[in-house]
Amino acid sequence: GDSVTQMEGPVTLSEEAFLTINCTYTATGYPSLFWYVQYPGEGLQLLLKATKADDKGSNKGFEATYRKETTSFHLEKGSVQVSDSAVYFCAHWNGGSNYKLTFGKGTLLTVNP
Amino acid sequence: DARVTQTPRHKVTEMGQEVTMRCQPILGHNTVFWYRQTMMQGLELLAYFRNRAPLDDSGMPKDRFSAEMPDATLATLKIQPSEPRDSAVYFCASGLPRTGRSSGNTIYFGEGSWLTVV
């Protein structure tokens, strides 16, 4: 069945370090891929998305590229800030199949000054 | 800005009481999801609807939980009777899927209903 696997945290980085959070998925058809971010005590916010192969989603310095050949959607940021500390969720939505939105387990990122 | 609206934002209730959480999806969105988030289990899909019809509610404890969409602008999640283990954040999300090679659209989340059952 459909699934999303993302690297388990927690991830702890120093400010200005490079960030990668890996995400791979299994799905039928052509799912859309998302990264959501949840700041402490808040709800889920869409960070970025990609709807087809080779699309790159980007927002707030974060990027992820939809790689159909490796079924991956890794999140990257060149220089993290303390304010990036949050939980990051990878997800896919197979709107052409069963319409189910499937999440990874989330990765806690802590950025230290 | 279009947004998913959830009420109540916070609720503290006593064990055994009925709790109803409401969600107004973004106008025009025909797919609605209910998720529960706890520290132990993370994000759990409880149920989701398309065009108001339930597609999957297998994640929901059937004996005490029920989810409905009385109309296209309202989704409800009810717990009766509530128990302390139901304490969690309940999120509603909505979207409008497109089929084909660029399938899917953006799913937007509400800010959650933070439930505490004492």
Image (cartoon, rainbow, N blue to C red):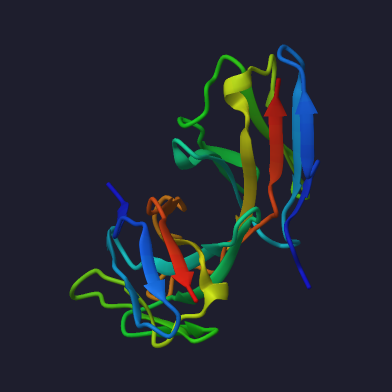
In the image, A54 versus B82, the foreground residue is: B82
Of the 4 image quadrants, the one containing the C terminus of chain B is top right
Q: Can residue B35 be seen by looking at this rendering?
A: yes
Figure quadrant of residue A57:
bottom left
Figure quadrant of residue B83:
top right
Residue depicted at 80% across the width and 43% down the height: B7
Rendered location of residue A37, percent (x, y): 53, 65
| Left or right: residue A64 compared with residue B1 | left
In the image, A7 versus A98, the foreground residue is: A7
Check the image and name the residue furthest to the front. A113
Check the image and name the residue furthest to the left. A69
Give the vertical position of B99 relative to A15 (above or below). Answer: above
Of the 4 image quadrants, the one containing the N terminus of chain B is bottom right
Give the vertical position of A59 relative to B45 (above or below). Answer: below
**Number of callouts:** 0
Q: Can residue B99 be seen by looking at this rendering?
A: no
Residue depicted at 65% across the width and 53% down the height: A41
Residue depicted at 42% across the width and 50% down the height: A98
Rendered location of residue A55, percent (x, y): 38, 85
Figure quadrant of residue A13:
bottom left
In the image, A56 versus A8, the foreground residue is: A8
Rendered location of residue B5, percent (x, y): 77, 54
| Left or right: residue A56 compared with residue B56 | left
Rendered location of residue A50, percent (x, y): 43, 77
